[in-house]
Amino acid sequence: MYGVYLQPVTNDTSFRNLNLIGDVVDIDDLMDSKGGAKSFCDGQVSATPPRYADDGMNMLFFESREVAEEFSRAIRGDLMSRIDGGEIIQPTPIWGNNFRLYADNGAMLTAIRSNPDIPSTFTDSQIETAIDDYMLETGKYPTDKQLVKWIQETRNLDIE
Amino acid sequence: MKSKLNRSQMLKLAKDFSDVYYNLPNYKADKMYKAVMAYDRWFIKDMPEIAYKTLRFKGGVLSPLTPMDDIQALCNLMARKSRDMLLPAITDWTYDYFDDFYRKGIELAQLNGELEGKTIPSNLTKEDKAIIEITITQEIDVWKGHFQKHYRQVERELIGAIQMGKDFDFFLARMTAPDAHIVGFPYGNSRYSWYEHVRRYAIGRPKMVATIAQQRKVK
């Protein structure tokens, strides 16, 4: 099962949440990584919102990754047009300029999966987090070579 | 598999979904907040009188010569009072509303399911009722654990004050959270008040329980 983060965006929406909107996640991976719920009340492991009591983020669930990604593209595209049109005053999210590429990580996942330098235990969710981090640092969607180098430099692959 | 919906239909569903999610009724949590305030008042007004009779002081500072049994008895009293004052209100709220939160989650599932062409019935099944029941039971058990954590917190702060040769006001200050309410127990490195724990519970649980239903039904 896959989840897609969703939140109605206003001028006050945090940049962290803005970046998360439309993110497609594998629920099993999310549960393994404690679902971002490390700061949740009593440390309960919950992949489901609210990860924090009132951060306002919600999630929709899908059996098909393809439909989840279609939905993600729809809401990210809509959000970008509202930001570009001035309807909401927000900076461009990290996926903004590349949202079409970013929303369809399938090709990148395949490329990284087939790279012998990345262990098979490194999950799709971890690859996507690495893409997020790369984009946050550089503002650009990486090539597969850039991403492999980034993962090697920033992740402890023996542990992960 | 591709969705049968076009982009504008998807966006309409996303909006309808958000309307239900963010308009989850504002369930009254007044009784829980009042219970917290009652404990805060007891802690500030009544507890110090008992503490001054129980603990030993020398030159105004806490003396390490207070027997450990007495320290533990005082800490136990605080933990027991917090449980007796807070738990009934929290239990009532949980029993009264979790069923409603779950039903709202089915509404969310119906909208969510449309994206993949699923029709989700609105009735509560036997399994749904069991899920609500175990969710309630688990929540109340978690709260019982919270009062044990409160014991650890008061004991830690009181013994710390004794070890550092501080007065009782130091303990009271350490037990006051940044929001001016009495600390329940810490989470991470933050000392959260009972008020904050209850606030998070009241705000978070409607959405969390609704999401349990949503996730189960969409599967």
Image (cartoon, coloured by chain):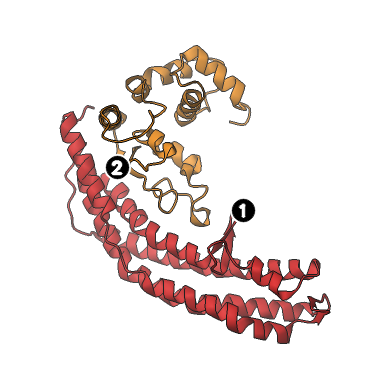
Chain colours: A orange, B red
Image coordinates for residue B67, horizontal then vertical, percent: 79, 80
Callout 1 amino acid: Asn
Q: Residues within 10 Å of mark 1 (few under 14, many from 20)?
A: few
Is residue A71 depicted above or below B129 in this figure?
Answer: above
The image quadrant of residue B55 is bottom right
Residue A54 visible: yes
Query: Which chain is disc 2 placed on?
Result: A
Q: Considering the numbered disc 2 on the image, is that residue within a helix, a strand or a loop?
A: loop
Quarter placement of the N terminus of chain A: top left
Q: Quadrant of residue A98?
A: top left
Residue A86: % across, % down: 27, 31
The residue beneath circle 2 is: A8
At x 22%, y 27%, the residue is B2
Q: Judge if badges 2 and 1 mark residues of a common chain.
A: no
Percent of width and height locating residue B205 = 38, 59
Point 38% across, 59% down: residue: B203
Q: Residues within 10 Å of mark 2 (few under 14, many from 20)?
A: some
In the picture, measured across the screen, residue A129 lies left or right of residue B99, that is right
Chain ID at mark 1 = B
Name the residue beneath numbered marker 1. B189
Amino acid type assigned to the residue bearing label 2 in the image: Pro
Contact between labelled residues 1 and 2, with CB atoms less than 8 Å apart: no
- For residue A96, side relative to residue B58 (left or right): left
B86 in relation to B218, above or below? below
Q: CA distance from mark 2 to mark 1?
A: 31 Å
In which quadrant of the rendered image does the C terminus of chain A lie?
top right
Q: Is residue A118 visible?
A: no
Q: Residue at x 48, y 73 (%)?
A: B36
At 49% from the left and 40% from the top, the residue drawn is A32
| Residue B194 percent location from the top left of the image | 51, 67
